[in-house]
Image (tube, helix red, strand yellow):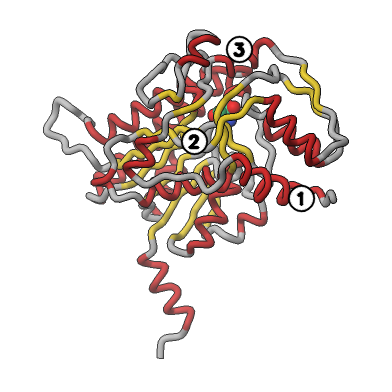
Amino acid sequence: MIDFRTIYILVSYYMETILITGANGEVGHGLIPALFKQAKCKIITLDINELDPDLQKMVQKSVVADINNEEILKKFIEDYQVNTVFHLAAILSTGAEKNPEKAIAINAGGTEKILEIINIVARSRKMVIKFIFPSTIAVYGLPSAESKVKSGAVKEEQFLNPITVYGVTKLYCENLGIYYSDNYQLLTSSQHGFVDFRCVRFPGIISALTIPTGGTSDYAPEMIHSAAQGQGYESFVRPNTKIPFMVMPDAVKALIQLANAPKDKLNKHVYNVSSFSITAGEISDLVNQVFPDSSISYNPDPKRQKIVDTWPEAVDDSAARTDWKWQPDYDLQKSFNEYLIPEIRSKYNKK
Ligand code: AKB
């Protein structure tokens, strides 16, 4: 007679193993519970910090290590027979500008290492490993305020002139991932295709549960979270600053949907995804309607303003919509009314 535990061990033996790097960050806090709920895979994680206890319960193994620790990474990926990697570890735009050398080491160096390792491991196993990479609207660099307004929704191939080290390293890693996927050792008889590189370029992401650190789109979540706590907020960008955003459940949906998409449907490696575009002033108006006591003022920081001024007002995500049926669940109204406001209210217990 086979008992329940034996069945579980047998079933989980055949389950896909997913490695999430940078797992204790904002996106990890959304992605881990969503994957855990699906109960289709084993999750293992790596982060420079200890994984939060709530998430710890959902993963099979968590390791505290630097993304540049090659030895640990390789052993981890080999020992757990990883099939898919969600490589979330990165330093965001404002944080990266404060320490470009560190950002290059983490964002570019860390991605180089993990791509090289999975390429070696996948080849030796003669099995494909999927590599899901979150990129960003920071890879774009619009030359002027006028072009930002006139360009309309920007396509994946346009305006790839980032001004930040974050944008530069993300764009480099997109291209490196494509190289491992399609052209590895171009001039030799070596077979490519053991790394299945898939990338989403995210807009600003707003979560109701966590507050980001070190991003330049952070004014949006900071405004909402501050108001919900009855605190004033001084925005570091002008009220007419407009960029695209999406809420965390849609960001997580995009990552999982792209990871699960049939390979023969994917005509690109890198896809824009988007939900709504909004100015800082419009966000503050929406926040004021819900929290009338909130006081939001503006004191633009020229350096951070310069960064967002090079990011597009909107991105064209039609390729994702066609190839893997991407569609956000939350438009602007629904994001505020059915996700952000109720969840943030209950987080801070504010009526
Ligand atoms: C940042 O502001 O750096 C990020 C991003 C847009 O990628 N949120």
User: Which kind of residue does numbered mark 2 sit on?
Assistant: Ser
Q: Name which residue type carries label 3.
A: Lys
- Residues 204 and 335: in front is 335
Q: Is residue 298 visible?
A: yes
Along the line of sight, the residue nearer the viewer: 226 or 128:
226
The tag earlier along the polypeptide, 3 or 2, is: 2
Residue behind label 2 places its C-beta within 8 angstroms of ligand 1 = no
The amino acid type of the residue labelled 1 equals Lys
Sequence-wise, the earlier of marks 2 and 1 is 2
Residue to which mark 3 is pinned: 306
Nearer to us in this view, 257 or 22: 257
Element at badge 1? helix
Determine the residue positioned at 72% across, 15% down.
300
**Residue position marked by numbered label 2 in the rendering:** 274
How packed is label 1: few (under 14 Cα within 10 Å), some, or many (20 or more)?
some
Of tags 3 and 2, the one toward the viewer is 2
The label number, if any, that marks residue 347 in the structure image: 1
Q: Please state the horizontal and vertical placement of residue 192, each as a whole percent of the image.
A: 21, 37
In the rendering, at what x and y percent does residue 230 appear?
86, 38
Q: Where is residue 31? Give x, y as percent.
A: 54, 49
Say whether residue 63 is visible: no
Q: Could you give the CA–CA distance between mark 3 and mark 2, rounded to whole angstroms?
A: 22 Å
